[in-house]
Amino acid sequence: MVLERVQNKEQKKRFKLLIVFASVLFFVLFLRLFYIQLFSYWKYKSLAQNNSTRVVPKRAARGIIFDRFGEKIADSVPSYTISVIPADLKDSDKVIKMLAKILELNENEIKEKIENQKYKVFEAIKIKGDLGAQVISIIEENKTELAGVIIHTEAKRNYPNKTMAAHVLGYVGEVGLKDINNGKYVIGDTIGRAGVERKYDEVLRGVNGSTKIRVNASGKEIKSLGEEAYVKGTNLVLTIDLKLQKICEEIFKDRRGVIVVMNPRDGEIYSLVSKPSFDPNIFCGQLDGKEWSRMVNDPNRIFLNRAVGGLYSPGSVFKIVPAVVALEKNKLTAKDVFVCRGTYHYGKDWSYDCWKSEGHGVLSMEDAIAQSCDIYFYQLGLTVTADKISEYARLFGYGDLTGIDLDGEKPGLVPTPVWKKDKYGIHWFPGNTIQYAIGQGYITSNPLQILSSYNIIINNGTSYKPHVVKAIGDKQMEKQMLKSFAISGKTLELIKKGLWKAVNSGTGAMAKSNYSIAGKTATVENPHGLSHAAFAGYAPFANPEVSVLVFIEAGGSGGVNAAPIGKAAIEAYFKLKKERYAANRKTEP
């Protein structure tokens, strides 16, 4: 009896413990469910949605680039793109292998793109764009075996004029790993790589959008869940006149070098030709590595914008600088003369020739500029000293960047006796000054600097920053001063008369025109072969509205080969102006 009571008591105790344990267990489960329902609802809802929702980027179309008269120079066209959604790759190795074969890509290249976006498994990752209908057809035919692969359209950059103005426009390309790491881009985005495409990439590229789709367990699209529209990039209006650009490229033909035509009053560039050139459309699709290597290593340096990145001795177009020095520092006057007999002897052992072997005879400065007499400027240089030439060269803009809104500009070199001593450990010799005075020797410049230096004469001591963008959207760009310093009226008058004579009765006679052109020629010594040919000029003489610089690598005589091209460019500008004026008159009510 006692034993039964003890057993019953023990059983009741165990039953109570079981009840307590069960109660605690159910309470814990209740709390967990309560927490999930109340506090983790949005988290699990998001996970559930991600399991059935996919995001396909809608990349913004880049802004359109127009010329100054509204002609399209760069726009966008639709193209087919292949992307993958990592979460839907049921057999990733098999799919990647098939995709690599169809798209003619390396498997590791595809894997790398996916790996670099590994935290975006529900978003479409671009694998290759700019695909033709045949490739898309193959993808469609094998769609059942390519789970996770999607086809969609994107805006592709298009340059309808191909190589024309390529060094102004630049080109675009798909972002690389370095670009992605800065947080602004993702795989598949497009970025400006050169020219205005690069300089104004921030405003041109716009803001990407996306499309959300509902998929089933197999990753097949069920329906669209709406989209977030992209914001198109801002349009640019260039200062370039596309018709003038075309004419300048045609008259330059297959030469190597530069033509720049600009408005000296505000720095707007109407035409910029740099040859050899390239077709920026090549970079809008998937560029083959071998083709890229071939272009980069092309000995013609097709990507070099010679107008701003090519460095040359300026030659005789530089002579206006020491001429201004001599007049402003009262070392010479308009009446002072030097004699040219074809050879100039300095001391017993050194002699320097003029380009005209029989000599020019007795010359004033005005005639020395017109005839580009080297011997006159040899003696002028020794009169004013190298330091003074360097001082004024910098005032004219040599040795400094022009600040043009293009990349790749190089400042060149303005030498001084101190620079030579520091660089080579050798003193500056009189012979260095003699060469310096005719724009030879150590001095180097880019062609745009030369043109800017002539704009200073045109504007009586002021030049404006060259630029190729006229407006960003509706915002007009304002002119900015580049250089300004005092030059006396007498000095300016003499230099201008010399430049007028150079074209109308001197070395630049082949630039003589009814449009009243003034300017200066140069035949620049080239240590690598035939001399470079150059011409800097402007028109009309009395009230200049256009200036031009022609520089032809290994072009021979500046007067024979560069001056006629400068004339043709200036005449084309005025003819187009006349045609547009006539067309506007016809449309007036």
Image (cartoon, rainbow, N blue to C red):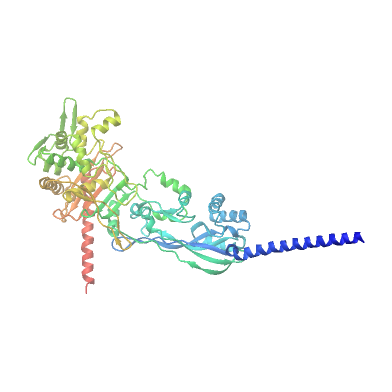
Q: Is residue 286 above or below residue 474?
A: above
Vertical placement of residue 326 versus 254, above or below: above
Q: Residue 338: x, y in percent?
A: 10, 36
Evaluate whether residue 410 shows in this view: yes
Question: Residue at (62%, 55%) from the top-left corner?
Answer: 94
Q: Nearer the viewer, residue 309 or 63?
A: 63
> In this image, 43 relative to 449: left or right?
right
Q: Position of residue 186 (x, y in %)?
A: 48, 55
Going by the image, does 198 lie left or right of 6? left
Residue extending furthest toward the bottom: 589
One can see residue 256 in this view: no
In the shown orientation, is residue 82 left or right of residue 296? right
x, y percent for residue 29: 69, 63
Image coordinates for residue 374, horizontal then vertical, percent: 17, 37
**Farthest right residue in view:** 1
Tell me if 521 is positioned left or right of 130 in this view: left
Q: Quadrant of the C terminus?
A: bottom left
Q: Foreground: 309 or 512? A: 309
Q: Residue furthest left?
A: 335
> How many numbered marks have been drawn onto this rendered protein structure?
0
- For the N terminus, the quadrant is bottom right
